[in-house]
Amino acid sequence: MLNSSYDGEIEQWDMIDKYSMNVIYTASVDIRRRMSAKKRSFDFVEFDTDLVGEQDIYPSEYVISDNSGHCCNVKNEWLYEAMLCLDDKLKEVLILKYWYLLSRRDIAKILNVSEKTITNWKNKAFKLIKNYKERRLECDIRGP
């Protein structure tokens, strides 16, 4: 009889032990989940404050258009600023060539000029954009 009461106590302690282990495991899982949630929310807040940053410029602010109604969305701020400085005919050639993917011949037909003129305007636009970028780098304005 002594053995059976001893066995009963062992079973009770085993049950208490299993219950305790289960509680500890569940608590640790909950703690890990809460810590993970805090880390995720902190990362989001940190990321969100990075977006607020120096200036709020949205892609819609980088839209370039010419007098003929052709437009494009430029992703680089310095390129956007450089293209704003170009004459409309130079902007139009670049937009039609690189955003509308038209050939030099098609652009010449649209603008009623020779293909050689299109090449000259494109080269002039590239030269002006390159000069703008170099001036900007020399003045150390916001980098490239």
Image: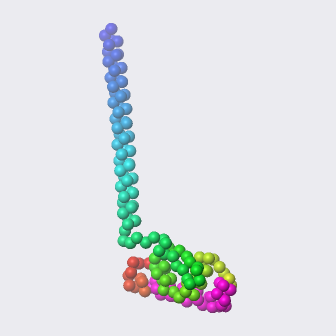
48 or 28, which is in the foreground? Answer: 48
Q: Image height check: is 23 above or below 143? A: above
Q: Quadrant of residue 54?
A: bottom left
> Does the magenta-highlighted stretch encompass residue 113?
yes
On-image quarter of the N terminus: top left
| Residue at image point 34% right, 27% down | 17
In the image, is 121 to the left or to the right of 135? right
Is residue 51 visible in this depiction of the protein? yes
Is residue 123 visible in this depiction of the protein? no
Q: Quadrant of residue 93?
A: bottom right
Where residue 9 sits: x, y (%)? 32, 18
Q: How many labels does the image show?
A: 0
| Residue at image point 68% right, 86% down | 109
Where residue 103 sits: x, y (%)? 66, 81
Q: Give the image's coloring scheme.
A: rainbow
Q: Image height check: is 113 above or below 15? A: below
69 or 124, which is in the foreground? Answer: 69
Where residue 55 sits: x, y (%)? 38, 72
26 or 106, which is in the foreground? Answer: 106
> Does the magenta-highlighted stretch encompass residue 57?
no
On-image quarter of the C terminus: bottom left
Where residue 11 sits: x, y (%)? 36, 20
| Residue at image point 36% right, 63% down | 49
Given the current orientation, which residue lies at the most extreme top position?
Answer: 1
Main secondary-structure element of the magenta-colored stretch: helix
| Residue at image point 68% right, 83% down | 106
In the image, is 41 to the left or to the right of 106? left
Q: Quadrant of residue 119?
A: bottom right
State which region is magenta: 107-134
